[in-house]
Image: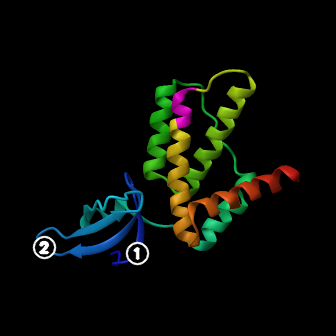
């Protein structure tokens, strides 16, 4: 059971802070999504807590940033864009922080390749890149106790370092 004050990852809302646990016929966590600035609270059944996961540790977060240059992008079999979108949305909802970082790298590369070929990348690429970036930066910033901009700077430095090697 998660404790009040802990940060967890909700499949739909991303990183949330456990604000309380309401004990009743059906115990629920009261969660506050970090992405919401309007004070929204989510009631989430304790019995379904297996769908939640803890935020990555500081060491895991640093490892994801340090290993970004060596991380593989996800190749697909050339199916439809709609099927790819479903696949990656599912991965963002139910995968790990590392999965979200890999999705960021995958779509950064796909967008760059399309632009290098003087083609406009599909809108879905931008949308998935944005979702994956927000999800991963939010979680890594909590794990490292830094702002999202500071974490983004760490990725940029790690990527520049990897390119120089």
* Residue at 70% from the left image edge and 51% from the top image edge: 71
| Rendered position, 10 above or below 128 | below
Q: Tell whether 65 sits left or right of 33.
A: right
Where residue 162 sits: x, y (%)? 81, 54
* Residue at 51% from the left image edge and 23% from the top image edge: 80
The residues colored magenta run 122-126
Check residue 94 for magenta coloring.
Answer: no
Q: Nearer the viewer, mark 1 or mark 2?
A: 1
Q: Nearer the viewer, residue 60 or 164?
A: 164
* Residue at 59% from the left image edge and 73% from the top image edge: 58
- Extreme-front residue of the structure: 38
Where residue 144 sits: x, y (%)? 59, 71
Q: Nearer the viewer, residue 66 or 127?
A: 127
Tell me where residue 119 sits by quadrant. top right
* Residue to which mark 1 is pinned: 6
Alpha carbons under labels 1 and 2: distance apart: 21 Å
* Residue to which mark 2 is pinned: 24
């Amino acid at each position: 059971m998660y404790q009040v004050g802990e940060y967890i990852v909700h499949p739909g809302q991303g990183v949330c802070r456990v604000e309380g646990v309401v004990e009743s016929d059906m115990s629920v966590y009261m969660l506050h999504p970090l992405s919401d600035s309007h004070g929204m609270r989510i009631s989430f059944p304790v019995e379904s807590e297996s769908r939640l996961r803890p935020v990555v540790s500081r060491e895991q977060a640093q490892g994801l940033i340090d290993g970004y240059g060596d991380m593989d992008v996800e190749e697909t079999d050339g199916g439809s864009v709609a099927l790819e979108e479903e696949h990656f949305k599912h991965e963002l909802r139910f995968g790990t922080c590392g999965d979200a970082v890999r999705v960021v790298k995958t779509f950064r590369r796909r967008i760059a390749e399309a632009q290098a070929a003087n083609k406009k990348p599909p809108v879905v690429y931008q949308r998935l890149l944005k979702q994956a970036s927000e999800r991963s930066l939010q979680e890594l910033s909590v794990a490292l106790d830094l702002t999202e901009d500071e974490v983004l700077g760490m990725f940029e430095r790690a990527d520049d370092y990897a390119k120089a090697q």
